[in-house]
Structure formats: structure tokens, C-alpha cells
Image: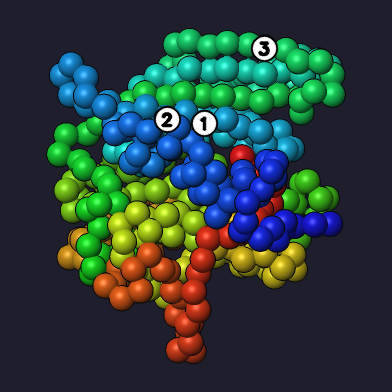
Amino acid sequence: MVFECPLPIQDHDTITLGHGGGGKLSQKLVEQLFVPALANEYLEELHDGAIFPSDGGQMAMSTDSFVVRPRFFPGGDIGSLAVHGTVNDLAMCGARPRHLSLALILEEGLLLTELRDIIDSIRQACDESEITVITGDTKVVERGSGDGIYINTTGVGALMPEVQLSPRRVRPGDKVIVSGSIGRHGMAIMSVREGLEFESTITSDSAALWPLVEGVLSVSQRRMHVMRDATRGGVASAINEIAQAAKVGVDLHEPAIPVDAPVRAACEILGLDPLYVANEGRFVAFVSPELADEVVDLMRAHPLGQDAAVIGKVVEEHPGVVRMRSGFGGSRVVDMISGEQLPRIC
């Protein structure tokens, strides 16, 4: 089994799996190809979604595509994942999710019973998130040209008043918070994909984060500086993206990072670092230091944030670099991953 594509960071003539891993190759593709060609004031923010003016206030929009394999996994499936992923991108902008578009690319031979289960899962996830699908599209490709089903969703939401989330607002002294234990989604996918059995079943953390985010933003408002959901590339990539955009350093404290024992054991067996494993119901937040403890308490009072913790702080030193301090006093650089630890995670 191959769990990582250790590709060097260099020029490529073709697209590799590493370009979709949420690490350095993904970043390079976006910054050197997409942004120069399509540059505008909204795209250049490089946020989880775009914020734009609308009559009566500001709106946010985000789009995402889902190609996870297997399509059904402990704790979810590609249908609920598609809704959760887009709802969460809107939440990271500080926007209440309102509407979704839904586009399906179906492969010839997909069982209608399976498609019905996926659509039912989408409906249930929409109901739970109080969001409606208002438009959509379906395409069918020949057998062997897809992987059963790919899903694209675009979401729009209304921005909460007084909320401004951007890496530009991050300052030295800010505390870094993670909303819960990390690595569950990636390990749930891997356990099914490779037929691995552990003492405890690892379930995906896939969930709609808006209820948790709304409660936090209702008290933090302008003192919450930026949030990012830790999907492809995991917590490490999310924090690196913010540090580089804000031009600040980040010091993490390894013992403070919550990792469930089964996930940690699975990562050790497979030679993976949970910091780089994808999540679908976790986010990192950079918040003013005087508010950090209150935010953590609010998160822990919600079922989606029971393991929330302060895991680090923003520093003036080593701008754009994330360092990890161990419980024994040592430190190491936590860089963005070069290739792809676990392909087709979301």
C-alpha cells in the first residue's frame, strides 16, 4: 500500500495526485496558474469562499467538488459530505448558509438504489442545516470514465453583522484554537478503503459546523480574526495557509493538540501524521488572546466542540513559518505537505 506521494516541489508537465492534496503542490497550482489568470479582488483573498456586497447586506459564496472513495464510510457518505463541506466553507466566512446548487456526474452502471440513498442523505443533511437546494444539473458519463458519482455543490449565505474574518486581521499574541480532535475523517476513509480493522471503529467527523460557529461568533465578533476548516492537508496545511497569508509565525504546543487514541494508533501503524490527515467537521480559529478561554468554553459546551483546545499562539518571529514545540522542550518546523498522504479523501 502507498500512503504518500513524496513528490518534490518542482515544475510539472502534467497534473499529479499531489496537486489535489491541499499541500504545497495545490498551493502552487492555485497561486501560479489560477490566480494570475483569473485575478480579481474577491478571488485574491484565497479564502474558503468569496464575500460580496448585496442589497441589504453582504453575502458569501463557496463551491466545492466531492470525489471521495469509498462513497459510503463510517459516519457518512458522499452525499452528506457534499452538504457539510459547502456549509462549512460558508461558515468559515462567517455566513449563515441559505441555498445550495447541486450538480451530479454519474457513471453508467451506478445502481439506482445507491443513488437514491445518496440523495436521501443529501436531503437529510440539508434539513439539519436548514439549507435548500434551489438548482442543479445532472450529467452521465460512459462506464469506466468516472467513479460512480462525483458531486459539485455551490452554496450562498448571508454574512453575520460585525463579523470580519481575514488572515490580514491576525496579530502576534493571537491564540490558535482547534474545535475538536483531529484526523478522524481521513482515518475512517482509510480503514474502509484498505479493509483495516482496529480495536475501535473510527468514524468520520463529517458534520455541518454552522451551529457551533454561530454560537462562537455571537460573542467574539470582531475579536475572532480568521477561521479555516481543516480538510485536505489537515490542520497543518490550514494553519500554514493562514500564517503565510498573514505574514506571521505560529508556535504550536504538541501535547495540547487533541487526537483520539484510536486515530493516533492508526496513524502510527500506517506511518501518518494526524496533523496532515483530513477532517470534515473541524476548524482552526485565530482569536484575540483575551477571548480564547471563553471561546474554548463555548465550543466545549456544544456537541461538535467537546474536545476544543488552545493549541498555539501567533508570534512575531519566523514569519510565515509554523513551529511545533514538543512536551520535552524540542521543536520542529511543521511545513505544508509536499504530496498526498491519502488521495480521494473528500
**Considering only vertical position in the picture, is 190 above or below 41?**
below
- The residues bearing labels 2 and 3 have C-alpha atoms spaced at a distance of 26 Å
**Which residue is label 3 attached to?**
139
* Amino acid of disc 1: Asp
| Marking on residue 38 | 2
Q: Quadrant of residue 317?
A: bottom left
Q: Position of residue 156 (x, y in %)?
A: 37, 23
Q: Quadrant of residue 177?
A: bottom left
Residue occupying image coordinates x 70% and y 41%: 14
Foreground residue among 207 and 57: 57
Q: Secondary structure at mark 2?
A: helix
Q: Nearer the viewer, mark 2 or mark 3?
A: 2
* Amino acid of disc 2: Leu
**Considering only vertical position in the picture, is 63 above or below 198?**
above
Q: Earlier in the sequence, mark 2 or mark 1?
A: 2
Q: Position of residue 275 (x, y in %)?
A: 54, 63
Q: Quadrant of residue 206?
A: top right
Foreground residue among 30 and 339: 30
- The residues bearing labels 2 and 1 have C-alpha atoms spaced at a distance of 17 Å
Query: Which quadrant holds the C terminus?
Result: top right
Residue occupying image coordinates x 61% and y 43%: 20
Foreground residue among 34 and 279: 34
Q: Neighbour class for label 1 at 10 Å: few (<14), some, many (≥20)? A: some
- The residues bearing labels 3 and 1 have C-alpha atoms spaced at a distance of 17 Å
Q: Secondary structure at mark 1?
A: strand
Q: Earlier in the sequence, mark 3 or mark 1?
A: 1
Q: Earlier in the sequence, mark 2 or mark 3?
A: 2
**Which residue is label 1 attached to?**
64
Q: Position of residue 76 (x, y in %)?
A: 62, 37
Q: Secondary structure at mark 3?
A: strand
